[in-house]
Image (cartoon, grey):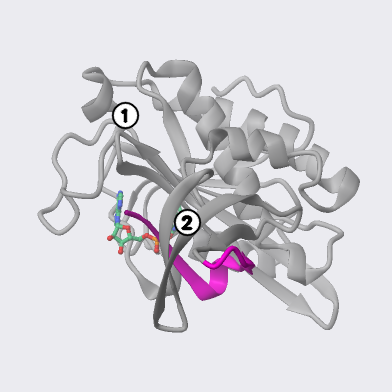
Amino acid sequence: QYDLKTTVLGKEIIVYNQVDSTNKQAKKLAIDGEKHGTVILAEEQLEGKGRRGRLWKSPPNKGIWLSIILRPDLHPSKASMLTLIAGLAVVHTINRYTKNQAFIKWPNDIIINEKKVSGTLTEMSSELDVINYVVVGIGVNVNTTDFDDEIKEIATSLANEEGKSFERALLVKGILESFEKFYDQFMVDKDLSHLINEYEDNCINVDKTVRVILDGQEKIGKAIGITKMGELRFVQASGEEMILNSGEVSVRGL
Ligand code: BT5
């Protein structure tokens, strides 16, 4: 159906009509030994998950709700970089089909016209210094035209921005093929050193003034790029550079 030009990613695709969360199912399958590269897709999620216990609205037949099972030979501290790989894959794929340019908002949002069209939730299981599995969950609002009140100011879809509907299978194919390409590049260095430029070119925060909340404290400064570990390089008004980790900071535009 997808005619995937990948070597391992999506060789096995498991499709659900309705599921609690594809990440949750992917984790169960991974625990039962499901292989590297398997993809879980759902038409609808009843308990789609965002980060830090937040919810991800996943109405039926309108979006892409997928999770990728990976078993990378990587130090657990590096698993979060896969979120940035997913961002690159999604932004590239979307920009092949849209007139409005999509951008990555570090670390995991994809933004079109200042609203969020996609997000990634990466979850990992590791023991000592070894990754058991990583699940990279990607949600894209494709053909949604009506958003719930709570999110309609911040969320959008490809259909809303472009004024037409999109074939989801084509986008899934693009995302998986692109993910594999960036993933393979990433695994050569086991860091983002060869993908920094690519990421920065597509990142909406770079060279912009941003407000960050770090340990409950607000700081204003400029984002100047990312490091090869995927952290945000942030320069404060004092000129001092800080390296921000996605787990401990929230970034807003001004
Ligand atoms: C994310 O969280 O952006 C990660 C979303 C990952 C979803 C995928 S779908 C497939 C896989 N299976 C899952 O169960 N999850 C993954 P975060 O940055 O925490 O953003 C969540 C916030 O975005 C919510 O608190 C809402 O404010 C908003 N939101 C909820 N649903 C949305 C939607 N469909 N589109 C845009 N924004 C949404």
Give the labeled residue for mark 2.
22
Residue 201 spot, x, y in % from top left: 59, 33
Left or right: where 3 falls relative to 251: right
| Residue closest to the eye, 197 or 28 | 197
Image coordinates of residue 98 in percent, x first then y, are 39, 19
**Residue extending furthest toward the left:** 149
**Image: magenta residue range:** 238-254
Residue 122 position, x and y percent, is: 57, 61
Please, which residue is most extreme toward the front here? 238
- Residue 251 lies in the magenta-colored region: yes
Res 212 quadrant in image: bottom left
Q: Which residue is mark 1?
A: 158
Residue depicted at 76% across the width and 48% down the height: 192
| 182 over 21 or under it: above or below | above
Q: Disc 2 marks which amino acid?
A: Thr
Q: Is residue 118 magenta?
A: no
